[in-house]
Amino acid sequence: MLKMAAPMNTTTSTSFQKKTRGKVAQIPGARPSLQNGQLLVSTGVPSLDFLVGGGLAVGTVLLIEEDTYGSYAQLLLRYFLAEGVMTGHSLFVASADDKPQTILKNLPCPVEDDPVKKSAEAIKSNEGAMSAEDRMKIAWRYEHLPKHQSTPSTHRFGHFYDLSKSMPDDRLSNVACHCLHMTDESCVSSPPYRRLFQQMEKQILDGGFSLLQKQSSNRNILRLAVHSLGSPLWGEELSTTQHDRHQGAELCQFLHALRALIRNSLAVCVITMPTHLFTDVAVTRRLERLCDTAIELESFAGSEKEKNPVYKEYHGLFHIKQLPRLNSLTGHMPDTMDLAFKLKRKKLTIEKLHLPPELPETVSRTQEDPVPRAIAPSIGCGSLGGRSKLDF
């Protein structure tokens, strides 16, 4: 007799497992990017956040090429530090020119009257004032369900600041801040860039910001700010091209090591550099490639463009040299590269460069000379100088 084959066991388990999305670290003042999922922090300037792809990615380096006098570059650096104070991030400030304590004392004051927060509080107070009879009657089985949040969240990425006021001292005392002045006696004994890198590495390791270490439950972000890196006050002369290349090699080594250190840590670094002092353009281009994001501020102060009526509404041009490309082959690209910045009484904004309309030549002549010119008397009957009584 033929034996029946045993039925196939359909209850055998497979090795397939559904891939779940990893949890994003919940850190105050940070949010994931909509493009690549990278954790972002604000620069303190909303218009700058929009241009670089929503904010600065954690683990990256931003290079700000200073203007001629360095005032606008330092202003962006103060915005970056002020945002760290408002979000509770740890700060590290290094400088060889101005004292880091002086930079921290001149941080802009945050704007307290937030319109988004005020509108949310007003709606909440109106809902609380409603009586039970005025509220909508719903089915008993839906009465105890959690209410859907109809109003937008009061948590906003980034803050607004008032440049006419300084940040109160009580806010600065609530955050951990480490200052490094390169002209101190303790920093003169060792090379400046090596000393700076050692201090940055120490802050990352001791503060628990390294991703190679065991992470604690209360994660935070370290903001590194370096003012006027590569200036003559850092111990190098830029008078000749040979010295320029020598310092460029040391700066390239420093940025290469710093970029590797920042990649494996919950830290973000902003560096201002007076690249207009370099005589070799190739050195500047190499330094830009060693940073994730590079921008240049071209101020109109002391130049011919300051008196040009075309740029009368702006204080300088904003050039984007390099944008980050993280976890993808392509990165964020703004709509236009023709950008300019203007400094108002209370804030700094970066806008699209709008040139005034170019009027036709006939219209400009009419506006300049509205009264018609007197026609000179002509000689002869067939003259073309104008119409006279002798013309026929």
Image (spheres, rainbow, N blue to C red):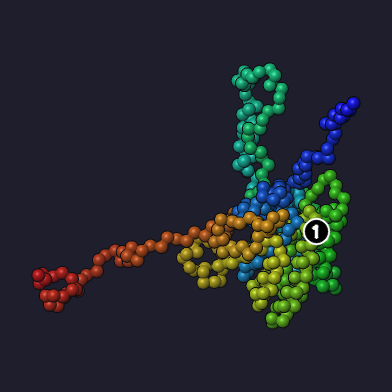
Q: Residue at x 13, y 75 (%)?
A: 382
Q: Which residue is mark 1?
A: 178
Check the picture and name the quadrant holding the C terminus: bottom left
Whether residue 45 is visible here, answered yes or no, is: no
Q: How many labels, in total? A: 1
Q: Residue at x 65, y 75 (%)?
A: 281
* In front of the other: 31 or 375: 31
Q: Is residue 128 visible?
A: yes
Q: Position of residue 204 (x, y in %)?
A: 83, 57
Q: Position of residue 272 (x, y in %)?
A: 69, 65
Viewer-closest of 235 and 42? 42
Question: In this orientation, which residue lies closer to the viewer: 385 or 40?
Answer: 40
Q: Quadrant of the N terminus?
A: top right
Secondary element at tag 1: strand
Q: Residues within 10 Å of mark 1 (few under 14, many from 20)?
A: some
Please give left or right for residue 2 compared with residue 128 in the image: right
| Residue found 72% across the figure and 81% down from its top | 242
Q: Looking at this view, is 213 or 102 the one in front?
A: 213
Q: Is residue 240 above or below residue 211?
A: below
Residue type beneath disc 1: His
Residue in view at x 81 percent, y 48 percent: 219
Q: Quadrant of residue 105?
A: bottom right
Residue 289: % across, % down: 69, 66
Q: Is residue 360 above or below residue 153?
A: below
Residue 158, image x, y percentages: 67, 49
